[in-house]
Image (cartoon, rainbow, N blue to C red):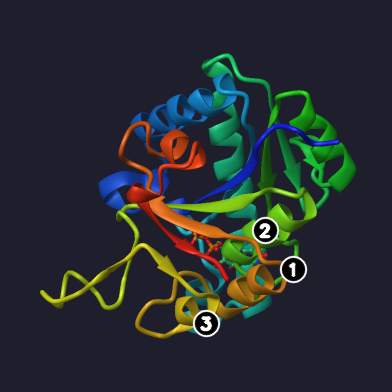
């Protein structure tokens, strides 16, 4: 029986890259490791899904016409494994116990995703990083985050972004943009808002899984939000 809080945190690949938009920055890995360590020290079970956009996106790879979309997506999924290994190193350097589980078998690098094994790791206080997306092309790591969260019975998915939460329109373009502290799944799918892709939101809605959108670069945010401070984020729920 799961008694502790269990959350799934989704980081985009781009977040790891910092200003350059490409590659992986040590300072960001360290920041993430500190934030995740705080959660573990506070007895919170943590799963992580990491994107791959700092290295490769299938749709982008296929743009030139030479690389098929499916191959591009395979490349994108491999990019998430690169990022997962980097985060694993960072977390371990802060003394955390970590397992990477890949949706695609890659036994020289990491475990293959097995739901029950992931749950055992979480119960033992290990951080589990879910890599290689869903293992299927035409999906995103946002959808992966919702899927894995539902599978492991997480109480929420936290989409860690560069902004404080969700606005009714782009605050960079519109002065009258309104901050939305809560919104419905249907609102979250609107083109002007688009918290995640429709597949991800539909899966969250079907399973009444709350999606929390917050600023990952505010130190202490993740812990405060999980402990119930809803002033620091937007929440998508029924
Ligand atoms: N991807 C995929 N299937 C999945 C998850 C990801 O094919 O289940 C591929 C897809 O090409 C995607 C890339 O991996 O563009 C990187 O993931 P994503 O774009 O979600 O990363 P993020 O935007 O979060 O960095």
Q: Which residue is depicted at the point 55% across and 43% down? A: 83
> Does any atom of ligand 1 lie closer than 8 Å to the CB of label 1?
yes
Q: Picture coordinates of residue 167 (x, y %)?
A: 29, 70
Residue at image coords 80%, 39%: 118
How many angstroms separate mark 2 from mark 1 (CA)?
7 Å
Q: Which residue is mark 2?
A: 133
Given the current orientation, which residue lies at the most extreme top position? Answer: 95
Determine which residue is flagged by label 1: 136
Category of crowding for the residue at label 3, using alpha-carbon neighbours closer than 10 angstroms: few (below 14), some (14–19), many (at least 20): some
Whether the residue under disc 2 has CB within 8 Å of ligand 1: yes
Number of the front mark, 3 or 2: 3
Residue at point 62%, 24% (across, down): 43
Q: Quadrant of residue 147?
A: bottom right
Q: Quick check: can you spot residue 114? A: no
Q: Would you name the residue on which mark 3 appears?
A: 186
Mark sitting earlier along the chain (1/3): 1
| Residue count near mark 2 (Cα–Cα under 10 Å), binned few <14, some 14–19, many ≥20 | many
Q: Nearer the viewer, mark 1 or mark 3?
A: 3
The picture quadrant where one finds residue 173 is bottom left
* Number of marks in the rendered image: 3
Residue furthest out toward the left: 175
Q: CA distance from mark 1 to mark 3?
A: 25 Å
Q: Position of residue 106 (x, y in %)?
A: 79, 44
Cβ atoms at labels 2 and 1 below 8 Å apart? yes
Q: Under tag 1, what secondary structure? A: loop
Cα gap from disc 3 to disc 2, whole angstroms: 24 Å
């Amino acid at each position: 029986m799961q008694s502790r809080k269990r959350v799934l945190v989704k980081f985009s690949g781009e977040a790891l890259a910092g200003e350059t938009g490409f590659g992986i920055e040590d300072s960001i890995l360290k920041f993430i490791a500190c934030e995740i360590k705080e959660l573990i020290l506070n007895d919170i079970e943590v799963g992580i899904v990491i994107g791959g956009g700092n290295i490769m996106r299938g749709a982008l790879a296929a743009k030139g016409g030479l690389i098929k979309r499916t191959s591009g997506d395979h490349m994108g999924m491999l990019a998430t494994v690169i990022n997962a290994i980097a985060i694993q190193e960072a977390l371990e350097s802060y003394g955390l116990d970590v397992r990477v589980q890949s949706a695609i078998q890659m036994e020289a690098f990491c475990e293959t995703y097995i739901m029950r094994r992931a749950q055992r790791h979480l119960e033992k206080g290990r951080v589990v990083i879910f890599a290689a997306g869903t293992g299927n092309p035409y999906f995103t790591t946002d959808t992966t985050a919702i899927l894995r969260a539902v599978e492991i019975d997480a109480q929420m998915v936290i989409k860690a972004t560069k902004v404080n939460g969700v606005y009714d329109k782009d605050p960079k373009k519109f002065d009258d943009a309104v901050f939305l502290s809560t919104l419905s799944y249907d609102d979250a799918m609107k083109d002007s808002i688009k918290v995640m892709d429709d597949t991800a939101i539909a899966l969250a809605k079907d399973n009444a899984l709350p999606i929390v959108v917050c600023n990952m670069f505010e130190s202490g945010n993740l812990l405060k939000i999980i402990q119930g401070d809803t002033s620091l984020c937007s929440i998508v729920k029924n």
